Amino acid sequence: MSENVKIRKPKPYTNPYLAGLGLGLVLLLSYVIMGRGLGASGAVSTVVASGVNAVAPTHASGNNFYAEYLGDGTTNPFKDWLVFEVLGVLVGGFVSGMFAGRVKKSIEKGPRIANRTRLYYAVIGGALMGFGAKLARGCTSGQALTGGAILNLGSWAFMMCVFGGAYMFAYFMRRQWL
Amino acid sequence: MMPYFKFDYFGADTGLVFAFLIGIGFGWFLERAGFGTAKKLAAQFYFKDLTVFKVMFTAIVTAMLGIYFLSSFGFMDISQVNVIDTYLLPQIVGGLLLGIGFVIGGYCPGTSMVACSTGKIDAFWFVGGIFLGTFIYGEVYPLIEGFANSTHMGKIIMPVYFNIPYGILVFAVVLMALGGFAGAEWAEKKFGYKRAGAVNEN
């Protein structure tokens, strides 16, 4: 029976500095091999642009934002570096979670908020992120981490504003998390 | 010469294989750090658990030092490395929106993918939100195109902008990160889940 308990209990997380070192080496490897950093939100843009293009092609081609992600029509927009990288992220996250016993259906939140409210907040937060990441030309991965490591001016301004915005707004969200 | 792709060691299709492999590493370490759960990520903004800051800055410093030394010793041609153009005002506004979205939604785009892969229902809704937000951006883009492309400063890195030698700035960032880590450890002891007598809510 003790064997059973052992399997169910998730393993503790890696030391933050060690995990950070690993993440930094992956980022460095990406720069060494490809000359570019990591990303996440860009893959969503490819899917959205392709979706709009499938439903309303003239609408999509007349819009500079969609057009940029659709390319000139000679190549498949899904044959994109970030799309393949994000597929890898899904695999890597899943494999790590499996080994640590952390793959489990759940809703992550504090004890003082209903599940339904949490899910609404998740959609609103995701939408703000999706919109903001387009305006900023990247998210925490593509700007803060990637641009941070090469001391990109805009990335550092962006990073300060992410932390600033989150800390400024945290008070209003305390019931969700604490 | 690094970066290998820029010097035609392999083609774009092989690059996609590397994209997938690099993604696996990225997802693995995000999950290992505990970034597959919104509770741990959001705790950053209440000084309860500063793992986000520690992991992010260790990663930035590691990659920054790697790039600095590889280029200083002539293994890497830094002029061939991608630099995203700076659009200062849109990036400031976008950053604030992301920050607010982070504390409301509990994830950022990369960590939400990892959370989805480990079964977090809220992360699926969050990713749905990213699609929605991106679609809204696309639809209103003709109206905000002017602002989105304003304050364009081109490819500009801080050593050039502030006219500080690259090595000095690298050193300053390392010192700043070390100071930040010391501060983070102190804050966790004072306010965090790890403080004496606190209930471990991790």
Image (tube, coloured by chain):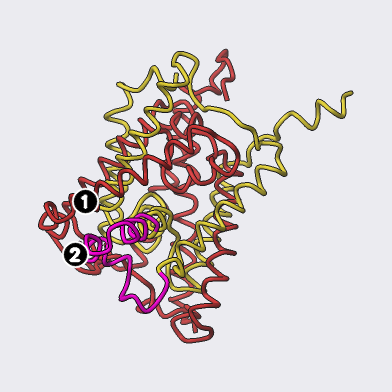
Q: Nearer the viewer, residue B174 or A28?
A: A28
Say few, some or many: other residues with alpha carbon within 10 Å of mark 1 (under 14 / 14 to 19 / 20 or more).
Answer: some
Disc 2 element: loop
- Residue A127 in magenta stretch: no
Quarter of the image for the N terminus of chain A: give it. Answer: top right
State the CA–CA distance, disc 2 to disc 1.
Answer: 11 Å
Q: Colour of chain A?
A: yellow
Q: Which residue is mark 1?
A: B139
Q: Identify the chain drawn in red.
A: B
Residue A74 among magenta residues: yes
What residue is disc 2 on? A62
Three-letter residue code for mark 2: Gly
Please state which amino acid type lies under the numbered disc 1.
Answer: Glu
Image: A150 above or below B143: below
Q: Secondary structure at mark 1?
A: helix
Q: Residue at x 25, y 46 (%)?
A: B136
Q: Residue furthest front?
A: A55
Q: Nearer the viewer, residue A67 or A104?
A: A67
* Residue located 72% across and 44% down the image: A99
- Tell whether label 1 touches label 2 (CB within 8 Å): no
Using the rendered image of the protein, determine whether residue B95 is visible from the camera's viewpoint: yes
Residue A169, given in percent of the width and then of the height, sits at 28, 28
Specify whether A71 is left or right of B196.
left
Q: Is A46 located above or below residue A162 in the figure?
A: below
Magenta stretch in the rendered image = A47-76
